[in-house]
Image (cartoon, grey):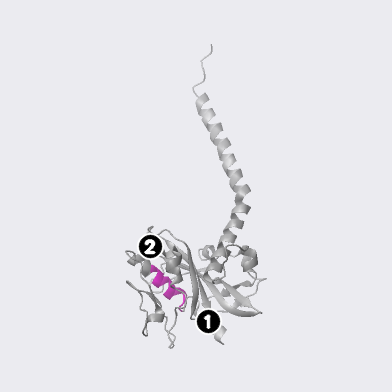
Amino acid sequence: MAEESAAKPFYSVLILAFVCSALVAGAAVGLRPLQDANRLQDQKKNILYAAGLYEQDKSIEELFAPVETRIIELASGLYIPKDQIAPESYNQVKAALTESSGLPLSNMDDIARLRRIEKYSLVYLVKKDRRIEQIVLPVRGKGLWSTMYAYVALDIDLTTIRGVSFYEHGETPGLGGEIVNPKWQDGWRGKMLYTPAGKMDLKIVKGKAAESGDQAPYQIDGLSGATLTANGVNNLMEFWFGDHGYKPYFNQLKR
């Protein structure tokens, strides 16, 4: 019997690896449309949750019908025509990393530790009888271990919070990970972003938020054992609702 070639096992492994790689690549390509559809559904669900409109027994598409998706230029606060940038295909997180659609942030301005910011942002207008009732805005920033992503829904007065939805993070489970706890998120409803003088004063405090007094509308219960995560949330809120975030847009709406 002829001796088997020493290279035969190598070729067998190589062919097996090639076949497996082809199957994995084919599955990834084939499932991408489904993954994209599921990602979009999850995004809409979190927007609806922040706006207080999510109902488990109703379809996402039905609930999302009164929501209009628009794009704004952050620096000016102006709406961008839909034929210039299509909202349904725009990814602002990826845009921030490009030279054409993103900008670097200085150390002084980068309190949310993003390093770069996009020129254009998605906004979600919740309407009733063609009138805007609330606006849902995407925000993000670094916590202790990760970038935290959320939606913040504001009343048309542009300062009262209708709700929040933190939906993606890598913070410590049971500590900073409590930002996704519905009970904690419920504590944001009715809180105020800005003082009558226009100062952004919302803060997560240590311990329990005040239930009465001048500071009560601006305080949110602390996260036990997660001071750095709470600081990260405070910083991202201060950034996105300041001059480099949505403040120019709010100024346009008020005009």
Task: Answer with the quarter of the image where residue 249 lies.
Answer: bottom right
Q: Is residue 55 above or below residue 129?
A: above
Q: Amino acid at mark 1?
A: Phe
Sequence-earlier tag: 2 or 1: 2
Residue drawn at (38%, 81%) of the image = 216
State the image coordinates of residue 192 (x, y, percent, origin top left).
45, 80
Q: Is residue 66 above or below residue 97?
A: below
The residue that disc 1 covers is 250
Q: Is residue 70 left or right of residue 164?
A: right
In the rendered structure, does residue 233 fall within the stretch colored magenta? Answer: yes
Q: Is residue 174 above or below residue 185?
A: above
Residue drawn at (53%, 72%) of the image = 137
Give neighbour class at mark 1: few <14, some 14-19, many 20+ (Cα, 10 Å).
some
Main SS class of the magenta portion in the image: helix
Q: Secondary structure at mark 2?
A: helix
Q: Secondary structure at mark 1?
A: helix
Q: In the rendered view of the protein, which quadrant contains the C terminus?
A: bottom right
Question: Which of 90 and 3 lies nearest the eye of the viewer?
Answer: 90
Q: Is residue 200 above or below residue 148?
A: below
Question: Which of 95 and 211 lies nearest the eye of the viewer?
Answer: 211
The residue that disc 2 covers is 176
Q: Find the magenta span and give its range.
A: 232-242
Q: Is residue 190 left or right of residue 54?
A: left
For the view shown, which residue lies furthest in the right direction? 83
Q: Nearer the viewer, mark 2 or mark 1?
A: 2
Asked whether residue 50 is in view, the answer is: yes
In the rendered structure, does residue 191 fall within the stretch colored magenta? Answer: no
Task: Answer with the quarter of the image where residue 46 lies.
Answer: bottom right
